[in-house]
Amino acid sequence: MFEEPFRWMEAISTRHSYVREKLRKGQPVIGVPYDEGALLLGFAPQPGKVFEVYDRIAMGALGHPADVERLRMTLLDMAHLEGFNRSAEDVTIGRLLQFGIAPAIKQNFEEVMRAPYLVQLLLAEISPRDETLFYRLNYDGYWESFTKGCVIAGDTQVMNRIEKEIDATPFATYPLERALYEACRLWERGLRATEEETSSNHESDKDEDAPPTLKEAFERWPLEAAVLSRKTTRKSLYRALAPGEIGALKTRLAGA
């Protein structure tokens, strides 16, 4: 009987290791402010990286597609129920996380006989006070809030490196075109710099696992990107970037 708490702690530690390993090779999703709102972007081998959640809320995801879809639908249901029972202004990420999805994910993770969610979520919001807010929700229910932007990535080193660059870059002053360009460059630098550090510490050949350049990323995967814009006249502030906007970005990157 006295061994049970220790067995539970060991099981929780094993679950952390298992989920981190599953998420490790997932491509990062970046969320940053720009002069009219918030920008989310990420490369994905299949659709399912960036979504609309509610009028002022967007979501980026990393992980197993089935778990991403399940949590997306949960957030949608919670947001619309909150909006129906209270008001659209009461639907905020803080409320959805604190009183809804974060406790549910934490309970799921700590019930060791159930499969954990293989997922990380990035949430962006234009608040009723027109503040641009970002949140990161982990697979164990732990969440954090940010104002300068944030990133989700399966590799903690990559995530920390990109996050430092986000904090040092004045994205909130940039127009959309420049914010999109700088965020993509930051995506590339974060992956490549971390790989160089790892390679310098280990002499084994890592060519097969080397992260892609932006050119290679565009050749292998589509870029999913969307904005929450304060300038729109529509009730929903969410807009997926048009193919022409992505094409202009690729042209600019090719000429850089």
Image: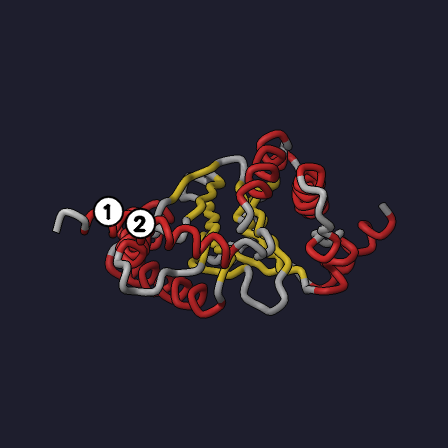
Q: Residue furthest top?
A: 168
Work out whether residue 39 or residue 198 is closer to the camera in this orientation and state it. Answer: 198
Q: Residues within 10 Å of mark 1 (few under 14, many from 20)?
A: few
Q: Are marks 2 and 1 in contact (CB under 8 Å)?
A: yes
Closer to the camera in the image, 53 or 221 = 221
**Rendered position, 189 above or below 225:** above
Q: Residue shown at 31%/53% (left/top)? A: 11
> At 56% from the left edge and 42% from the top edge, which residue is drawn?
159
The residue lying toward the viewer, choosing from 30 and 173, is 30
Q: Position of residue 114 (x, y in %)?
A: 30, 64
User: Which three-letter amino acid code belongs to the residue tagged 1?
Assistant: Phe
Q: How many marks?
A: 2
Residue 172: percent from left, percent from top:
60, 36
- Quarter of the figure with residue 127: top left
Where residue 6 is drawn, which disc sits there?
1
Point out which mark residue 204 bears: none
Q: For mark 2, give the secondary structure.
A: helix
Q: Amino acid at mark 2?
A: Glu
What is the spatial separation of the Cα atoms under label 2 and label 1, in whole angstroms? 6 Å
Determine the secondary structure under disc 1: helix
Q: Which mark is residue 10?
A: 2
Residue 99 against residue 244 in the figure, above or below: above
Q: Residue at x 20, y 47 (%)?
A: 5
